[in-house]
Amino acid sequence: MARRILRMRMMDVEDLLSELPEEVIHHIMYSLPTLEATRMSVLSKRFFSMWRSLPVIDFDLDQLRSHYSAKDLIDFVVRSLERRRNYGVLQRLRVSSVRGYDDNDDKSLLIKDMLESVINFAIRNKTEELDLDYSTTRKPFYLLPMPIKSLLFSSKCLKSLRLGNIYFGGHYNLILTCPLIEDLKLRRCIGLKSIEITSAAQLIRAVNFTDCASLESIRIEPHSSLQSFTCKCSGHEYYHVSCDTNFNLASLESLKHLHLVSVNITDEWLDYHVSRFVGLESLVLEDCRKIKNILITGENNKSLRKFVFRCRTTPSDANVRIAAPSIEHLRIDDDGYPAKLNISGCKSTLRSLCLTLCTVNDEWIRKNLSGFRSLEKFRFRGRSVKVPLFEKAKHKLYFDSLKELDLGSELLLSSELEIEAPNLESITYTPFRGIDADSAPLRLICPNLTDARLSLQRFGKNLDDPVLHKILIELLRSFGHCKTCSLFVYPPILDKFQFSEHERKTLIPPLYEVKHLIVSSSSISPKDVPWLVDTSLWLVPHPETVSFKLHENNHNMITEIKKRKIVYLVAPPFLLNVGDIVYLKLHGRTWMTA
Amino acid sequence: MSSSSTTTTTTRLLMLKASDGVTFEVEEAVATKLGAINNMVEEEGSEDLICLPNVNGKFLGMVLEWCKKHANNNTNSDKGNDEVNKWWDKEFVMDLDQNTLYHLLMAADYLSGTELVDLLTEKVASMIRGKKVEEIRETFKIKSDFLPGQEEEIRKKNSWAFE
C-alpha cells in the first residue's frame, strides 16, 4: 500500500514527456510551428539534442522577417544550418518567402550565398523533400550554378522537389534522373529551355510547371508512371511566357490528371494525346486559345470523370461536344457567340454541371437542359444576353436528382420558368439584369426545398413602388415554404424594401413558413434600422431567428432591437432571436438585459 | 441490416494478451488497425493468441476501443461518419491526464497505430502551443539540466523565438 502511494507520488512529479521515444518527440515537434519547436530546444539538454536532430527544417522567412533585418535573417539561416547535427537523412527542408521583398543589389549576393548553402546542405544531408522559393519583386536573380544543377537533378534521395524563382542561366536543358522522385514543381523558374523526365525517374507521379518562361519543350519518357501533369502560364510581366511549349507526353497510359492553362496546344495535339491517355480521369483546359474544336467521345477515355473548359478573358469561339458517358463533373465557362456547346451525350451520368454561357438561345436550352437523370448540382450563369422582347419563351425544366441549384442566367430568368425538382434542397437565385415590370414569374415545384438564397442587385427604374412591391412579393413567395431564406440586397435598392403600413395590413406575408431569415447588405444606415426590423418581421411572421449581416457595428440597430424587446444579438453579424433570454454580445462583451 | 451481414464472410477473432495477463477478444479487422498486429497476422497467419508484453491491460483496452471505433466507421465511408469520428476522437483525448496520455502514446507507438499516434501527438502539441518555455516546463514537470549560461546561449542564437 505504502509503495503504491509512493509510486503515485513519484508519477505526479515525473517528467513523462522526456521519457517518450525520440521519434515521438520529433513527431510532436514537427506538428508545431517552427517558432514553437525552436522554443522547445531550451527545455532541457535532451530536448536540445532532439531539436538539433529534427529531420525537418522549415524556414518561413516571411515570419522571421519581423524579427530580423534582411542581412541578419540570411545570416541566421546559414548559421542554423551550420549548427545542425548531421542526421543522415533529412526528411524535409523548406525555405520560403512568398511575399516578394524589394531586395536591393547589395543584398542579392548574400541571398545567392544563402540559397546556395541551403541547396548544398540539402544535397549533403540526403534530403527527401526540398522546397525552395525566395521571391523578390524583381526577376529571380539566383543563378543555379552548373555543378549544383547536375547534383540536384540526379539526386538519389529526393522524393519531392519544389523550386521557385530560380534562374537557370538561359537555354538550360533540365534532365531529371532522380530514381526516387515522385513530385516535381517548378514555379517562376526562368532560363530553362527544355525539361526532360527520363525513365530513370521511374517513380514520378506529379509534375507542375507554373510560369516557367521560355520553356520550349517538355518531354516525358514513354511508359513512365506519371499521374498528374500541370502546366500553367499566367503571363506575369517578368515571366512572360511563350506558350508555344512543345509537349511530348506520348503514350502516358498512367496519366490521370491533365491541367493546362494558357498553353497554345492545337486541336490536333488534343485529339492525338487525349485518345492515348487511356487512364485519364480529369481534363482541365483554361484559356487555351488555339483550340477550336473539342470532341470528347469517351471511346478511349473510359474513366474520364471530370472535364473543365474555361476561357475567361476573351471568348474562344470553340466548338465543344462532350459525349463521353463516364463524365460526372462538367464545367464550361465561355463567353463565345454563339455557344457551340453540345452536352447531350453525357446527360445520363452527369452529377455536377457548371455553365457560364452568355449567348445560348431558347432552342439550346430546350435541347440541352433536359433529361438529366443523376444531376445533383447545377449552376447556370451568364449575364449579357440579348433577349427578344417581343416574345417571351416558356421553359419547363425537370431534374430527378437535383439537390443544389444556382441560377443566374439572364436568358433563363427572363423566360417564363417552371422548375420541377422533387429532391431540390437549396437554391441560389441571382437576377443580374434586375427585376422589371415584365419580369417573368418563377414557378418552383420543389417540395423538399429548405434553403433559399436571393441576391438582388437592381430594380427597373420606372417602376413605381406598389407595382415593384407586387412583383417582389410574388418572387419572394416562390421561396415561402423554405426553412431558411437569405436575402443579399445591394445598398442602393435597400429602401425599396419599405412596405407601407397599408401593404403590410392587406397583403399576406410572402415568407410565411420561413424559420430563419438572414438579411445582408454591405451598409445599412441608422435611419433604415427601424423599418428594416419591421419589414423583416412582417416578411417572416413566425421566425426562430432573424439575422442581419453587416460589415460594421451599428449601435442604432441594437437600440432599436432592445426597444422592441426582440432579443439576442451577436455582432457582427447580428443575430436576433425571439426568445426568453435577452443578451447582447458586442465585440466580445456580453450585456444581459431583462 | 441483418440480411446484409449474412453475405459477408465470418470475421476471425484474435486474442490479445496484455503484460498483466488481461486478454481481449477482438475482430481481426479491428486489431489490424495496428500496424504491428497486422504484420504478425500476415507473417504467422494461424496464431490466434498474440502476447503483448510491453502493454498494460488498461491501456491496451483503450487502444482497442479506439481501433474499434475507427474500424467500424471505415466500412461505410461517407462524410457524416468522418465528422462523427472527429468528434469521437476529440472526446477521446479531451480529459486524458498526462500519465494516461504517456502510456497510450507508448502503446500506440509500440503497436504502430499510426493514426492514433497522430491523434495523441497532436494532443501533446496542443498542450505546448502558445506557452512560454517556463510554462511548458511547469506543465510537464521538466527540469532544466543545462549548465549556467548554456540556455542563455541557445536563446541568444534563436532570439526570434523567445521574444
Image (cartoon, coloured by chain):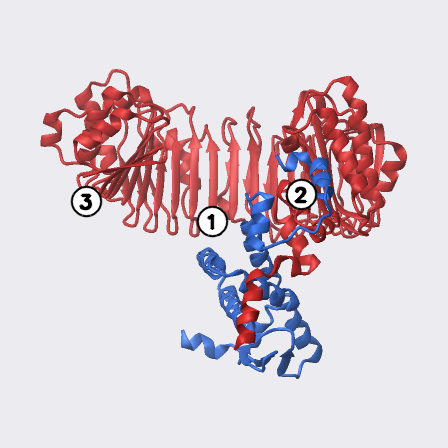
Chain colours: A red, B blue
Which structural element holds mark 2? Answer: helix
Q: In which quadrant is the C terminus of chain B drawn?
A: top right
Q: Earlier in the sequence, mark 3 or mark 1?
A: 1
Q: Position of residue A289 (x, y in %)?
A: 63, 28
Q: Is residue A175 left or right of residue A295?
A: right
Q: Position of residue B110 (x, y in %)?
A: 65, 68
Q: Report the residue that reaches farthest toward the top.
A: A462
Q: Mark 1 — on which chain does it sit?
A: A
Which structural element holds mark 1? Answer: loop
Q: Is residue B87 left or right of residue B124?
A: left
Disc 2 vs disc 1: Cβ atoms closer than 8 Å? Answer: no
Q: In which quadrant is the N terminus of chain B drawn?
A: bottom left
User: A457 and A366: which one is in front?
Assistant: A457
Disc 2 vs disc 3: Cβ atoms closer than 8 Å? Answer: no
Which label was assigned to residue A351? 1
Q: Amino acid at mark 1?
A: Arg
Q: On the image, numbered disc 3 is attached to which residue?
A: A580
Quote the CA–CA distance across marks 3 and 1.
45 Å
Q: Earlier in the sequence, mark 2 or mark 1?
A: 2
Quick check: do tags 3 and 1 share a chain?
yes
| Labels 2, 1: front one | 2
Residue B87 seen in render: yes
Q: On the image, numbered disc 2 is attached to which residue?
A: A38
Q: Amino acid at mark 3?
A: Asp
Disc 3 vs disc 1: Cβ atoms closer than 8 Å? Answer: no
Q: Mark 2 — on which chain does it sit?
A: A
Quick check: do tags 2 and 1 share a chain?
yes
Q: Mark 3 — on which chain does it sit?
A: A
Q: Amino acid at mark 2?
A: Thr
Q: Dot 1, crowdedness within 10 Å: few (<14), some or many (≥20)?
A: many
User: A145 and B102: which one is in front?
Assistant: B102
Q: Position of residue B104 (x, y in %)?
A: 57, 65
